[in-house]
Image (cartoon, rainbow, N blue to C red):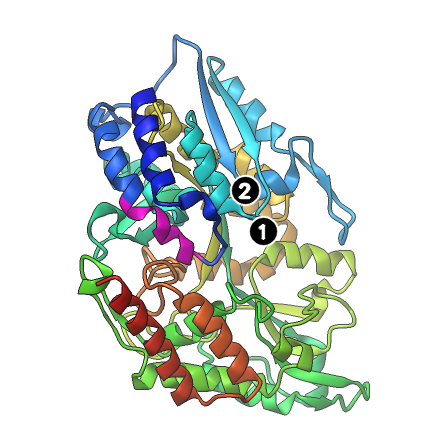
C-alpha cells in the first residue's frame, strides 16, 4: 500500500495538483490523468465487497475507518452546535459514531470534519497522505473515489431503501458517455419554491397549480413587483438563487434549461468526443427567461450582494427558491410565520422525457469510498449505514436537513406536516441518475471554465449588459476554446 501511495504522490505532485482548488468543480479535472494512472496498480491488488458478493459481517480484528471531508459533520461538530437563527441546539456527529460503534464494536470510526473553504484541495492532500477510507462529499472528485455501480448491483435491496445515488459523467472511468455512481447521499437537498401567501393575496394573484410553468412564474412576478396595495411597501416578484456566487449561480440556468428541455451536450467517451451546443433555441429561451425574471428581482439580487435567504415576517418577495427546505421551515417557525409561506415545487418541465415533472435540481451531502482504502468492504457497510440507519436519519433531521430515505422523511413530516409534500414530490420525481454537476443541460466539471463563464453571463444578463443570444455565443466560445486547448 505504501508503494501505491508513493506512486500516487509522485504523479500528482509532478502535475502541480496541490496549487489549490476552488469550489466550482472546474479544478476537479486537474487530478484526472495523474490519479487514474497511479491507481491502476493499486486496484489490481485490492479485493472489494462487490467482487466477493458478500457482506462485511462481524469483524474479529480491530479495524479503524478514517472518514475525512466537509458537510454536515463539520457544520455540527462532534458535540453539536447552536443555530443562531432558530435558537435550537442541534446534536453533534457523536450520535452517529456511537450508534455505529454499538453495531460494530471492533470497527472504529474516526471522523475528521473540515470546513468548506478549500475543501477539494484539502481532500486531495489528505488522500495523498494515505489512510483515508471514506471521503465526505467526495462524489464530486471522481478520480479519488471507488465506482459503486458493482456494489449496488450486488446489493439491490439497499438501493430500494434510498431515494437517490450520486452519479457523475466522468472520464475518470474512461467513458464520459455513461453515468458512474461515485457516492451515496446521507442528506438530500432538492430545490423548493417558497410562496408568500400574504403578497399573493394582497395583489389578488392566485397561487400556482402543480403544473405551473416558467411563463406562469414570469407573469406572476410581473404582477407582484411594485407597491403592495395593502401595506404600501415595495415588493418584488421573484428572487433568483445564489446570484452572489459565480460558482453556484448556474443553478438558475440549469433548472430553466431542464424546464425547456434545452439539452446542450451529447456525450462521447471524452470531452473531445462530445458535442456541445449552447446556441440552440432552448438555451436562448432559458437565458431570456433568466433575464426577464431579473426585471422583477430586487437590485441587491441582480447585483449579487447582501442576498438574504431566510424566511421572515419582513419578507418582501412573492416567489423565492432555494435548497435547505427543512431548515427554512424551522427558520420561519422560529419567527412565528411558518403559515405565511407555501412550500411548492419548481415549475414543470415543458417537453421531453420528463415532461410534467418539476424542473430538476437536487443538492446533497454525500459520502464516497476512497480508491486507496484497504477497508473497502467495511467502508461500503458504513455508506449503507449512514444513508439508511434510523438513528442517523433522526440526527440528520434534528439538524434541519433531509435524510436520503423515505423512512427518515417521516421525521421531517412530523415537524412540517403538509408542507413536506413538495419535498416528497421533488424526491420521488427527480430524474433517475440526475446530478447537478454533470447532465445533458450543463456540465461544470468536464469543459474547463464554463461554470465561471456562466456566472459572468448571468450577472451580465441580470444587469442588462448582454442579450440572451450574445450570452449563448459567449458560453459556446468558452467551451470551444477549452476543447481546442486540450487537443
Q: Quadrant of the C terminus?
A: bottom left
Q: At x 32% / y 57%, what residue is drawn? A: 432
* Name of the residue lying farthest toward the top: 60
**CA distance for labels 2 and 1:** 27 Å
Q: Secondary structure at mark 1?
A: helix
Residue 349 visible in the current orientation: no
Indicate the quadrant where residue 303 lies.
bottom right
According to the image, label 2 marks what residue?
70
Label disc, if present, on residue 372 of the rendered structure: none
Residue 472 image position (x, y, % from top left):
37, 82
Residue 426 image position (x, y, % from top left):
46, 61
Q: Nearer the viewer, residue 44 or 292?
A: 44
Q: Residues within 10 Å of mark 2 (few under 14, many from 20)?
A: many
Vertical position of residue 15 compared to residue 50: above or below = below
Q: Secondary structure at mark 2?
A: loop
Q: Nearer the viewer, residue 253 or 461?
A: 461
Residue 223 in magenta stretch: no
Residue 31 in magenta stretch: yes
- Dominant secondary structure (helix, strand or loop) of the stretch shown in magenta: helix
Q: Nearer the viewer, residue 136 or 408?
A: 136
According to the image, label 1 marks what residue?
413
Residue 134 image position (x, y, % from top left):
43, 32
Residue 262 image position (x, y, % from top left):
33, 77
Q: At x 39% / y 51%, what residue is drawn? A: 28
Indicate the quadrant where residue 177 lies.
bottom left
Q: Residues within 10 Å of mark 1 (few under 14, many from 20)?
A: some
Q: At x 50% / y 54%, what residue is drawn? A: 22
Judge left or right: residue 337 versus residue 143: right
Find the magenta span and give its range.
Answer: 25-33
Vertical position of residue 19 compared to residue 66: above or below = below
Residue 390 visible in the current orientation: yes
Amino acid at each position: 500500500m505504501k508503494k501505491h501511495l508513493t506512486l500516487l504522490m509522485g504523479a500528482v505532485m509532478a502535475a502541480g495538483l496541490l496549487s489549490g482548488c476552488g469550489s466550482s468543480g472546474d479544478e476537479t479535472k486537474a487530478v484526472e490523468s495523474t490519479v487514474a494512472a497511479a491507481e491502476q496498480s493499486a486496484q489490481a491488488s485490492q479485493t472489494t465487497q462487490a467482487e466477493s458478493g458478500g457482506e462485511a459481517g462481524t469483524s474479529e480484528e480491530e479495524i479503524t475507518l478514517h472518514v475525512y471531508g466537509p458537510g454536515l459533520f463539520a457544520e455540527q461538530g462532534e458535540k453539536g452546535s447552536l443555530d443562531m437563527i432558530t435558537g435550537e441546539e442541534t446534536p453533534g456527529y457523536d450520535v452517529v459514531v456511537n450508534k455505529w460503534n454499538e453495531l460494530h464494536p471492533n470497527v472504529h470510526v474516526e471522523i475528521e470534519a473540515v470546513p468548506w473553504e478549500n475543501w477539494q484541495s484539502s481532500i486531495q492532500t489528505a488522500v495523498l497522505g494515505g489512510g483515508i477510507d471514506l471521503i465526505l462529499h467526495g462524489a464530486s472528485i471522481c478520480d479519488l473515489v471507488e465506482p459503486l455501480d458493482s456494489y449496488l448491483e450486488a446489493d439491490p435491496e439497499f438501493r430500494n431503501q434510498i431515494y437517490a445515488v450520486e452519479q457523475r459523467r466522468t472520464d475518470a472511468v474512461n467513458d464520459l458517455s455513461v453515468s458512474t455512481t461515485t457516492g451515496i447521499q446521507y442528506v438530500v437537498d432538492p430545490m423548493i419554491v417558497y410562496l408568500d401567501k400574504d403578497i399573493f393575496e394582497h395583489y389578488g394573484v392566485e397561487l400556482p397549480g402543480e403544473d405551473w410553468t416558467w411563463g406562469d412564474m414570469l407573469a406572476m412576478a410581473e404582477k407582484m413587483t411594485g407597491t403592495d396595495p395593502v401595506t404600501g411597501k415595495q415588493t418584488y416578484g421573484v428572487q433568483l438563487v445564489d446570484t452572489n456566487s459565480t460558482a453556484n449561480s448556474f443553478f438558475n440556468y440549469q433548472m430553466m434549461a431542464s424546464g425547456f428541455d434545452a439539452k446542450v451536450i451529447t456525450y462521447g467517451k471524452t470531452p473531445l468526443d462530445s458535442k456541445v451546443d449552447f446556441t440552440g433555441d432552448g438555451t436562448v429561451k432559458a437565458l431570456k427567461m433568466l433575464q426577464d425574471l431579473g426585471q422583477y428581482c430586487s437590485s441587491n439580487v441582480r447585483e449579487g450582494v447582501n442576498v438574504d435567504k431566510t424566511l421572515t415576517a419582513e419578507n418582501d418577495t412573492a416567489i423565492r427558491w432555494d435548497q435547505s427546505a427543512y431548515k427554512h421551515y424551522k427558520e420561519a417557525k422560529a419567527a412565528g410565520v411558518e403559515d405565511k409561506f407555501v412550500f411548492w415545487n419548481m415549475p414543470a418541465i415543458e417537453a421531453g422525457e420528463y415532461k410534467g415533472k418539476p424542473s430538476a435540481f437536487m443538492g446533497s451531502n454525500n459520502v464516497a469510498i476512497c480508491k486507496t482504502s484497504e477497508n473497502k468492504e467495511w467502508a461500503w457497510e458504513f455508506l449503507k449505514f449512514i444513508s439508511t440507519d434510523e438513528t442517523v436519519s433522526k440526527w440528520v433531521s434534528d439538524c434541519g436537513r433531509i435524510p436520503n430515505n423515505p423512512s427518515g422523511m417521516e421525521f421531517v413530516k412530523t415537524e412540517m406536516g403538509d408542507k413536506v409534500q413538495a419535498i416528497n414530490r421533488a424526491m420521488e420525481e427527480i430524474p433517475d441518475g440526475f446530478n447537478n454537476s454533470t447532465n445533458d443541460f450543463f456540465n461544470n466539471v468536464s469543459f474547463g471554465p464554463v461554470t465561471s463563464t456562466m456566472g459572468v453571463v448571468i450577472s451580465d444578463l441580470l444587469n442588462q449588459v448582454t442579450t440572451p443570444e450574445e450570452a449563448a455565443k459567449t458560453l459556446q466560445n468558452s467551451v470551444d476554446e477549452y476543447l481546442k486547448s486540450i487537443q
